[in-house]
Amino acid sequence: MPGSAEDAISAPADADARRRARPTVAYPVENLPPYDAAFYARARAGMTRVSELVVPPRDARAFVVPTGHIFRIVCVEGPQVGDLNLWNRYDLSERFFSGKTRALHATHVSTGDRLWSTLPYLRPMATITHDTLAWYGFDEDGAGVHDVIGTRCDPYTNLLLGGGIYHHCCHSNLSRALADRRGIAPRQAEPHIHDVLNVFMCTGFTRDRHRYFMKASPARPGDFIEFFAEMELLGALSACPGGDCSATHSSDAAACHPLHVEIYRPADDALAGWQPSAASAYPRTHADGQEQATGPD
């Protein structure tokens, strides 16, 4: 019967040789625009805070970041994970692409990494300019901070796994926040909610089966991650009901804290010569017969 010992698949004679195949980084990034540390340092120097937003525990809020401005997500009272969505302010079809960000950078992001937008645009939406948790690196469990591997807690998975009806999962929080901002119903907003940057979340994969795990966030009051807006952004941030995500999410069991979003305007001359990011130049013909293919066979 299925699942019995008779169904076990024996390793082939050359199994070890197959396993010894050398790994290759899937996306060489030498041709990506380099991180211009001097430019971003100038943008940060003399910047002025122009607005601040409080995201209540187990809830979300939406906010706008003008092009060329800087925004921070700040831990203010205690360890707290935040789920971040980003969109083109004027076109919700262009939104943060966590999968491509992961492929181009890593499973966890920090200073110098960019948050990329979805196809067909594929451009930097924001660049991480400062991260007070950059010291964490990867710990003995293989965990790091600020991941782009988790999706977001949602009421559908919660119900599937036996948790019952819960309305303050990050997916629902983000749906309400976007709905409030755009003046639409949550059901209309929901299709625009997408996989997140898990701000302050400490995560990794187990060594035995590579299952996604979470552990207590190392964030403390005063910690922040900071971004430069490479285009006009609409953001939404949920203060996860899991709190520091050390034990649970999608419930009211964890201690939760607010998060702050701070928006800064650089000095007037700091952005001289800078241009917002441009969408991909690929013509979107997809070899439809209107042009000759120029790539390899």
Image: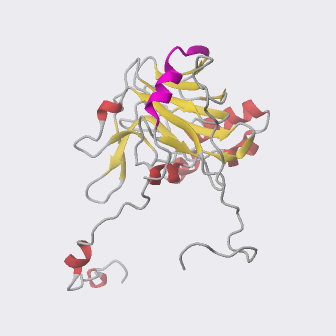
Residue 70 percent across, percent down from the top left = 56, 25
- Say above or below: 92 vs 233: below
Which residue occupies the extreme front position in the image?
A: 273
Along the viewing direction, whichever of 73 and 159 lies nearer the viewer = 73
Along the viewing direction, whichever of 132 and 210 lies nearer the viewer = 132
Tell me which residue sits at (30%, 80%) in the image. Answer: 4
Is 141 inside the magenta-drawn segment? no
Tell me which residue sits at (72%, 73%) in the image. Answer: 291
Residue 198 percent across, percent down from the top left = 47, 39
Position of the N terminus by quadrant: bottom left
* Left or right, residue 228 beside residue 25: right
Along the viewing direction, whichever of 179 and 129 lies nearer the viewer = 129
Is 48 inside the magenta-drawn segment? yes
Residue 100 percent across, percent down from the top left = 52, 53
Tell me which residue sits at (41%, 38%) in the image. Answer: 248
Position of the C terminus by quadrant: bottom right
- Say above or below: 68 vs 47: below
| Quarter of image, res 281 | bottom right
- Say above or below: 130 vs 184: above
Query: Does the rendering let one see residue 156?
Result: yes
Number of marks drawn: 0
Query: Does the rendering let one see residue 169?
Result: no
Which residue occupies the extreme right position in the image?
A: 183
- Say above or below: 225 vs 198: above
- State the scheme by which the image is colored: secondary structure
Residue 48 percent across, percent down from the top left = 57, 13
Magenta segment: 36-50
